[in-house]
Amino acid sequence: MNGMEGADEGPGSPATLAPLSNPTFRSIWLASQVASLGWLMQTVTISWLMATISTSDLMVALVQASSNLPVFILSVFAGAIADNFNRRRVMFAGRCIMAIASAMLTASVALGFVDPWMILGFSFLSACGAALNDPAWQASVGDIVDRRDVPAAVTLLSVGFNTVRTLGPALGGIVVASFGLVTALAVTTLTYLVPLGTIWCCKWKVRSSPLPREPMSTAIYDGLRFTAMSSEIKAAIGRGTLFGLAGIAILALLPLVVRDQLGGGPLAYGALMAGFGTGAVFAGVSNGVFRRRLSQERLMRLACIACAACSLSLALTSSIAVAAIALALGGAGWVTAWSGVGVSVQLASPRWVVGRTISIYYALIDGGTAAGSWVWGTVAQNHSLAWALEGSAVALLLVAAAGVLFPLRERHESEPDPLEQFNAPAVVLNLKPRSGPIVVKVEYLIPAENVDAFLDLMRERRHVHSRVGARQWTLQRNLQKPVQWTETFHTPTWTDYLRLNHRLTTADKELDERVLQLHAGQHPPKLTLSIEQPTSSAPIAEHSTSYFHHR
């Protein structure tokens, strides 16, 4: 339950509210807010339970780690599942795991079986369900709403979660103080049942591919390769990971601040978390105004500075009022930072791979926050709580300065969808879907005066084809006939070759046309398709045809 998304417009604008006119999105979104409320109540309950039964500062900090580590471990697999299977069923399965884990934890506490490692185990299991649900839900947004409403829908995910953040911790603290831990955990379990029923009742159309599902290994490889080739996604993930590593100290160590520095109880902890959520909601409401006046990179830097000020204030104050104000500032910085990096990943990802890029994003940022929880918890235990919070503030300032090396890019439109239109060339051999590897060669005739322009386009073409599945891409020039150039790449199977062409977009088609204008032959560039075979097998067969004729 990350809630770390945003978009370019404030939630008060008509454009941002437009996705709520879609009944399916509205129903699941509202149900998700109920579950988020339960998640935050559970976080408060488990954190306070751990602080009361364990004297180890590290064990208290590991509550945050246990809720983030599963995303780091499982998200890449969950993203591949979300892109290859029915996303609605994947969401349902994830929500089931969350409900079962919460029910088991409630029963254990009610029966008196309370152990720090058991608490972490159930928290870990519940987070496994979230790790399965979140990529499928985030990827489904583009299936449920119109493409033009995707940024607004992502904004609503952030605003909804952070609105609930103002209520969840405070409500959790009130329920724990008034009715006890078991009641708070039971209420959490009931909230997890709401999205289960909603997902069961809601159905939405998803474009089906004529091609078979990708093997998990191939799907994961393609997602990792696409992410690695996108400078925009890499910058967003890198900054997000560092921000999570540095900034999680605020939330991970807050129970210790309340217990040791402020001398408070569950109500004080819940009130301070409500202050954090209030600042987050303010930042969400002001999101559009901020983005119109400041670049995303400047917003990211200001967010880091705000969280650094929050962490430093918590290290120095013994006043609940001052701590609440500091946490409101930290909450504003928290949602501003995550909205920037989250939307960058969403808008830079085409539909065929969005589940995987989102899952990789979640894996790394949650890995960063899990590592940060351990690091700052260790510092607090071995040195002091003040040292840990002051170190977090310094680290956050370094994250702000890291924008010099990899700044966040501005993007206002989502990545274009693939055409998914390709007439496969006829071949003589009886190929099976898994036949391969396939070798693709395209021959061009390029006059000397066009070589520089041709090389520029081919660099772009290499990037385009490699990110949609081409492997071992090369460009050769004929030594005996310098006007002849040959582009070569491989795909593991025949199905992968077809899938590559289905993933190309209108912009990629336009790139083909620009290359064609530099070709000097009377006929279109010649395409040769080959299949590799061991030398001990039958001779390799080839099929040649016109490349651009089939595009």
Image: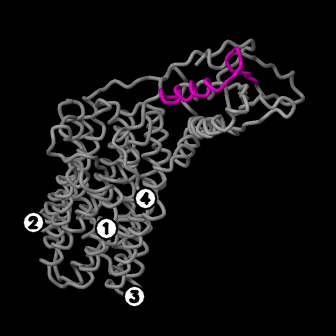
In the drawing, what numbered circle is on residue 525? none
In the drawing, what numbered circle is on residue 407? 4
| Element carrying mark 2 | helix
| Element carrying mark 1 | loop
Residue 194 as seen in the image, left or right of residue 215 = left
Q: Earlier in the sequence, mark 2 or mark 3?
A: 2
Labelled pair 4, 2 in contact (Cβ < 8 Å): no
Q: Is residue 151 above or below residue 246?
A: above
The three-letter code of the residue at mark 4 reads Pro
The residue sitting at 70% across, 18% down in the picture is 431
Q: Residue furthest front?
A: 449
Residue 284 on image: x %, y %: 21, 53
The three-letter code of the residue at mark 1 reads Val
Instruction: Please check the rendered image and state whether residue 390 is part of the magenta-colored stretch, yes or no.
Output: no
Mark toward the viewer: 3 or 4: 4
Q: Is residue 186 visible?
A: no
User: Picture quarter containing residue 324?
Assistant: bottom left
Pointer 3 residue: 383
Labelled pair 2, 1 in contact (Cβ < 8 Å): no
Could you classify mark 1 by the number of other residues whose Cα lies within 10 Å: few (under 14), some (14-19), or many (20 or more)?
some
